[in-house]
Amino acid sequence: MSIKLPKICYSVFLMLFMLLIWGCSTQKKIEENQDNAVIMNKKGLPVGSVDLSCEIIEIFERGGKSYCTAKITRVHEYGNSVKALAEGSEYEFEIDKKLLNNINQSSILDKDIRCRLIKLPGGLERNAPDKLKIVNIMNQ
């Protein structure tokens, strides 16, 4: 009996040690993944968005939606999957209706504003520009 007891103790000790090692390595991987997720969230804009400064030249309605013609003065940051916009060029953007209703339009016309745009779905043409919508104006 005394011979079997050390073998059982050794086996139990070995199993506990293996569980401890496995548990620590799993916890470390979870912590690394959480750290990477935080870094990714801090690093950039969401997919399909862009922060830029532009001068709103005109605001108009078409097909029940609000649009504007804007001249890009500076692109601050791109999210993934947004095609490049040329600074100094004019583009047509859709404007979120709720956003437009909550601002004084004269406060953004012919002024340099900073805003966030999101990419709209659609456009299967490979070289066509992205359809973008202004969803936030940071300064007005």
Image (tube, helix red, strand yellow):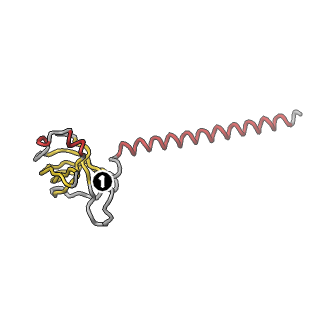
Residue at image point 63% right, 40% down: 21
Residue at image point 85% right, 37% down: 4
Q: Position of residue 73 (x, y in %)?
A: 16, 51
Q: Which residue is mark 1?
A: 119
Q: Of 97 and 49, which appears nearest the observer?
A: 97
Q: Single out the residue that lies furthest toward the front.
A: 64
**Among the 4 quarters of the image, the one containing residue 137:** top left
Q: Position of residue 114 (x, y in %)?
A: 20, 44
Residue at image point 35% right, 51% down: 47
Q: Of 95 and 50, which appears nearest the observer?
A: 95
Looking at the rendering, in which quadrant would you find the N terminus? top right
**Circle 1 — which element?**
strand
At label 1, the amino acid type is Lys
> In the image, is 12 to the left or to the right of 28?
right
Q: Position of residue 125 (x, y in %)?
A: 31, 66
> In the image, is 25 to the left or to the right of 91?
right
Looking at the rendering, in which quadrant would you find the C terminus? top left
Q: Residues within 10 Å of mark 1 (few under 14, many from 20)?
A: some
